Amino acid sequence: MTRQTDADQARSEALVTEKVLASFARTPDERLREVMDAVVRHLHALIREVRLTEAEWEAAVRFLTRAGHITTDTRQEFILLSDVLGASMLTIGVNHPVHGQATEATVFGPFFVADSPRVEPGGDITGGAAGEPCRVSGTVTDAEGKPVAGARIEVWEADEDGHYDVQYGDGRTAGRAHLFTDAEGRYCFWGVTPAPYPIPHDGPVGDLLAATGRSPMRAAHLHFMVTAPGLRRLVTHIFVEGDELLARDAVFGVKESLIKPFTRHPPTDPAPDGREPATTWTDVVFDIVLAPERI
Ligand code: BEZ
Ligand code: FE
């Protein structure tokens, strides 16, 4: 038998790709066909480019199987995988292009919980979460600078040990709440100064990070989700200026415009609302601009 030439080999590899592409060619949903066509082309190109070995293919299947096994209602390993590959942030980038002065979006993360408690303006969202008190205030306006009254602001954050309430597994609600802007579009609440924390890394995604010399740490941040009728829902965070993790956030969530100065005050500094924290405290201003629903 004659040996295959390189050209023969390339042709037989290309034939596999062509056959698979043809198998999807009659997909009735045009968008599904477009996406599957790209999935096949790029996946096959990857296999050819790295000359994937069978052992590596088996390792990839084992990795995905483990990701499936560890995934539950409260632990979504596939979203974590998307996050550490930058796929979550790229999808956000594709779907939320910068729109004038509108506040930029970033990753949602796995720790949002619906039905958070409501706090009144100036209220406390900590629910007993440990940490240095932090006063957060600002405005919500539309892209024309008009104040948005009654915008719903959901906030959630980890405590000073880097844990969200849901990670304690004891049913507590802490470090999360919602509130509404006043007639001038203003809001204000007390939380804790954000602390850095690792994304869940006791599963296959954590192993991938370790094997590639990457850290699971996220830069310290405070999550926001802001909604108002007729305006685009905003899911974002603010980050702490000066945090050394800003440049190597595990999920690539940091955007320059979302880095804010958190000013630290001694306990002797009374807060603008008269509150006198017993410890040092910080304050940060975050003015939010919502894009129109249809851009
Ligand atoms: C978070 O910020 O809560 C988060 C985002 C992505 C992965 C894990 C956690
Ligand atoms: Fe977070």
Image (tube, rainbow, N blue to C red):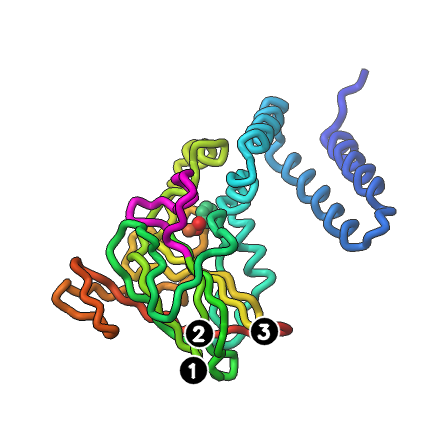
Task: Give the image location of residue 22, x and y in percent.
Answer: 84, 42
Q: Residue furthest left?
A: 268
User: Contact, CB < 8 Å: mark 1 with mark 2?
Assistant: yes
Marks 2,3: beta carbons within 8 A: no
Q: Is residue 165 magenta?
A: yes
Q: How many marks?
A: 3
- Residue 181 shows which numbered tag? 2
Q: Quadrant of the C terminus?
A: bottom right
Which residue is at the front of the view, 31 or 269? 269
Disc 2 crowd rating (10 Å Cα; few below 14, some 14-19, many 20+) is many
Residue 35 location (% of width, % of height)? 73, 50
Q: Amino acid at mark 3?
A: Pro
- The mark found on residue 184 in the picture is 1
* Front-most of residues 193 and 220: 193
Residue range highlighted in magenta: 158-176
Between 122 and 281, the one nearer to me in the picture = 122
Residue visible at 37% across and 51% down?
A: 174
285 sits left or right of 78 in the view:
left
Q: Residue at x 30, y 67 (%)?
A: 284
Give the label on residue 229, or none. 3
Indicate whether 295 appears above or below 168.
below
Left or right: where 197 falls relative to 280 = right
Q: Left or right: where does residue 90 sit relative to residue 262? A: right
Q: Give the SS element for disc 3.
A: loop
**Residue 67 x/y as whole percent:** 56, 33
Query: Residue at left 80%, top 38%?
Result: 20
At label 1, the amino acid type is Glu
Q: Is residue 214 above or below residue 263?
A: above
